Image: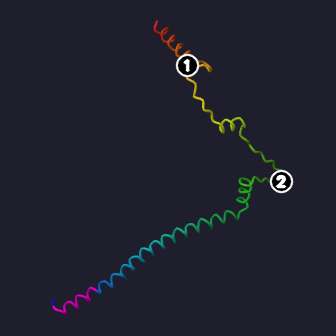
């Protein structure tokens, strides 16, 4: 290869390499712009939802509903009632027992060998 060809080849390589960086940046910015457009659409939808919620919150009916449900408020002359759960049921839920479930036919307080003997007797009398 002649020196002149080497210089031309070097210049072409330098030009190609210098063009690759802006092209890569352009592609990267293009994908970033697409992501921003998607984010903008999501935010526009969120803004529309919030504006609708704002309109609801400005109505007297919605203010009354929130005051009743979340704050427990009532109008003058109304009586508020609260339904409370049974304290015994709450205590039973709070303190689970470590006892096993009784087996069918088992009476509380019977020893295991007595239950076994009763099962043998029941089986023998059932065969006759």
The span picked out in magenta is: 2-13
Q: Quadrant of the N terminus?
A: bottom left
**Vertical placement of residue 49 versus 1, above or below:** above
Label 2, label 1: how many angstroms apart (C-alpha)?
65 Å
The answer to which quarter of the image holds residue 31 is: bottom left
Q: What's the residue at 51%, 14% (across, down)?
A: 119
Tag shown at residue 76: 2
Which element carries disc 1, helix, strand or loop?
helix
Name the spot of residue 66 as percent of width and height, x first: 71, 57
**Residue 59 relative to residue 6: left or right:** right
Q: What's the residue at 62%, 66% (across, down)?
A: 50
- Viewer-side residue, 35 vs 122: 122
Which residue of the protein is positioned furthest toward the right in this rendering?
Answer: 77
Name the spot of residue 64 as percent of width and height, x first: 74, 57
Which residue of the protein is positioned furthest toward the top in this rendering?
Answer: 128
Which residue of the protein is positioned furthest toward the left in this rendering?
Answer: 1
Name the spot of residue 16 as percent of width and height, x first: 29, 84
Q: Earlier in the sequence, mark 2 or mark 1?
A: 2
In the picture of the structure, the residue carrying the numbered disc 1 is 112
- Viewer-side residue, 46 vs 62: 46
Q: What's the residue at 71%, 53% (across, down)?
A: 69
**Residue 53 relative to residue 104: left or right:** right
**Vertical placement of residue 98 versus 113, above or below:** below
- Viewer-side residue, 54 vs 61: 54
Name the spot of residue 24 as percent of width and height, x first: 36, 78
The answer to which quarter of the image holds residue 94 is: top right
Q: Magenta stretch: residue 95 in it?
A: no
């Amino acid at each position: 290869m002649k020196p002149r060809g080497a210089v031309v080849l070097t210049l072409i390589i330098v030009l190609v390499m210098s063009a690759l960086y802006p092209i890569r940046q352009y592609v990267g910015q293009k994908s970033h712009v697409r992501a921003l457009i998607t984010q903008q659409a999501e935010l526009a939808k969120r803004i529309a939802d919030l504006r609708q919620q704002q309109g609801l919150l400005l109505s007297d009916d919605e203010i009354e509903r929130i005051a009743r449900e979340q704050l427990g408020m009532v109008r003058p002359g109304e009586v508020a009632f609260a339904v409370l759960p049974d304290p015994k049921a709450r205590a039973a839920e709070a303190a689970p027992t470590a006892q096993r479930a009784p087996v069918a036919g088992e009476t509380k307080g019977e020893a295991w060998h007595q239950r076994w003997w009763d099962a043998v007797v029941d089986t023998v009398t059932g065969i006759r």
